[in-house]
C-alpha cells in the first residue's frame, strides 16, 4: 500500500529531478522483494507518464529500464502491450533525447531476451513507429538506432518481420484509398451544389473567405501555390540574414536546473567583504 499510494504518486511532482534516483531505487527494492507488485507499478508509471516535459520523460525511461532489469518473465507478459505502446510513442518523439533513450533499450541483453520470447506481440506494436521514423525523424543518430532495432527484430524472426512489413504497406494503401474516396465524395457534393438554381448567387465568394470553416486534410492547388510563394520568400530572407551574420552559433539543449542550487547561488555572498586586509590587520 505504501508503494502504490505514496511512492508512485511522487512521480507527479514538478520537482521530481531533485529526488528521482532515490525514489527509483526504493521502487526497485520493493519489486526485488515481491515481483507480484511489478504490474501495478508499471501501470502506475504509465498512468503518470509526462506528456509535455521531455527531461522528466527521460527520467521515467531510466527508471523503467531499471524495473525491467529485475522483472520476471511471467510479469513481463502481463504488461508488455501497454508498455511497448508507450515506448512506440517515445520512439516517435520529436525530442531526440527521449527517442534516443527509448531506443537504448535494444542494447540491453536481458530486455532483448524478453522481447525475443514475445516478438509476435511486440513487433506489430513497434514496427509502424520504427519504420516511419527511420525515414522521417530529423536526427541522424536516431536513424542509426532505429536501423539497429529493426535489424535485431529481423534476425529474431524473418517471417514475422516480412508479415509486419506487408501489413504496414497494406494499411498505408488503405489510408490512401480512404483519402481518394473522401476526395470523390467532396467532388460529388460540389457537383450537386452546382445543380442548385441558387448556386449562381453564391458562387462569387470573396477570395479572402477561403472556406476557413471547412478545413480538410487534402490541400487545394491554391494552397500549394501559396505555400510555394511563402517558402521562396522565407528562403530568400534566410539567405540574406545568413550573409549578414557570418558567425553561426550552435544552439545547445537546455538541461533541467535544480531550484535549490539556483537559490543557493543567489544567496551566496563572497567572503572577501568580511575579511580584513593585511594592512588593516597591521
Image: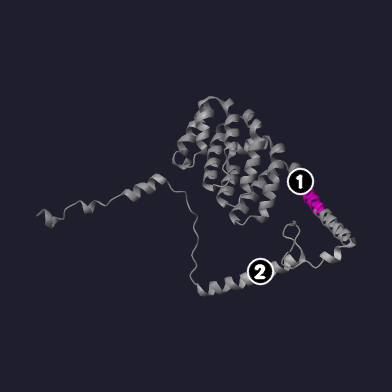
| Label 1 neighbour load within 10 Å: few <14, some 14-19, many 20+ | few
- Left or right of 258, for residue 181: right
Residue 190 in percent (x, y) is at 85, 60
Q: Residue at x 44, y 41 (%)?
A: 18
For label 2, the crowd category at 10 Å Cα-Cα, with few meaning under 14, some 14 to 19 and many 20 or more, is few
Q: On the picture, is 203 further left or further right than 55?
A: right
In the image, the segment drawn in magenta is 168-178
Does the magenta portion include 175? yes
Q: Using the image, determine if residue 28 lies above or below residue 133.
A: above
Residue 166's place in the image compared with 46, above or below, is: below
The quadrant of the picture occupied by the C terminus is bottom left
Q: In the image, 194: left or right of 237?
A: right
Q: What kind of element bears circle 1?
A: helix
Image depth: mark 2 or mark 1 in front: 2
At horizontal 55% and vertical 24% (from top left) the residue drawn is 34
Q: Give whichever of 125, 7 is nearer the camera.
A: 7
Disc sitting over residue 195 in the figure: none
Label 2 vs label 1: CA separation? 42 Å
Magenta-span inclusion, residue 271: no
Under tag 2, what secondary structure?
helix
Residue for badge 1: 162
Q: For residue 80, what is the image quadrant? A: top right
Dot placed on the residue nearer the N-terminal end, 2 or 1? 1
Q: Main secondary structure of the magenta part?
A: helix
Residue on which disc 2 sits: 230
Amino acid at each position: 500500500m505504501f508503494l502504490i499510494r505514496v511512492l508512485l504518486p511522487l512521480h507527479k511532482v514538478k520537482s521530481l529531478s531533485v529526488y528521482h534516483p532515490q525514489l527509483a531505487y526504493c521502487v526497485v527494492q520493493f519489486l526485488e522483494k515481491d515481483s507480484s507488485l511489478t504490474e501495478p507499478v508499471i501501470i502506475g508509471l504509465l498512468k503518470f507518464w509526462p506528456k509535455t516535459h521531455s527531461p522528466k520523460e527521460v527520467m521515467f525511461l531510466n527508471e523503467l529500464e531499471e524495473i525491467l532489469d529485475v522483472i520476471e518473465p511471467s510479469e513481463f507478459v502481463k504488461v508488455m502491450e501497454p508498455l511497448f505502446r508507450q515506448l512506440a510513442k517515445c520512439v516517435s518523439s520529436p525530442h531526440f533525447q527521449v527517442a534516443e533513450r527509448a531506443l537504448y533499450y535494444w542494447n540491453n541483453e536481458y530486455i532483448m531476451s524478453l522481447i525475443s520470447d514475445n516478438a509476435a506481440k511486440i513487433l506489430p506494436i513497434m514496427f509502424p513507429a520504427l519504420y516511419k521514423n527511420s525515414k522521417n525523424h530529423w536526427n541522424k543518430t536516431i536513424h542509426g538506432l532505429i536501423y539497429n532495432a529493426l535489424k535485431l527484430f529481423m534476425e529474431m524472426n524473418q517471417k514475422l518481420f516480412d508479415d509486419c512489413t506487408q501489413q504496414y504497406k497494406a494499411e498505408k494503401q488503405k489510408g490512401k484509398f480512404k483519402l481518394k474516396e473522401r476526395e470523390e465524395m467532396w467532388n460529388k457534393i460540389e457537383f450537386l451544389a452546382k445543380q442548385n438554381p441558387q448556386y449562381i448567387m453564391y458562387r462569387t465568394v470573396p477570395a479572402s473567405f477561403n472556406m476557413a470553416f471547412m478545413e480538410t486534410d487534402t490541400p487545394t492547388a491554391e494552397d500549394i501555390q501559396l505555400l510555394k510563394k511563402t517558402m521562396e520568400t522565407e528562403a530568400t530572407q534566410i539567405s540574406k540574414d545568413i550573409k549578414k551574420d557570418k558567425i553561426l552559433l550552435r544552439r545547445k539543449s537546455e538541461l533541467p536546473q535544480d531550484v535549490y542550487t539556483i537559490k543557493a547561488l543567489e544567496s551566496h555572498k563572497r567572503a572577501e567583504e568580511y575579511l580584513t586586509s593585511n594592512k588593516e590587520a597591521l
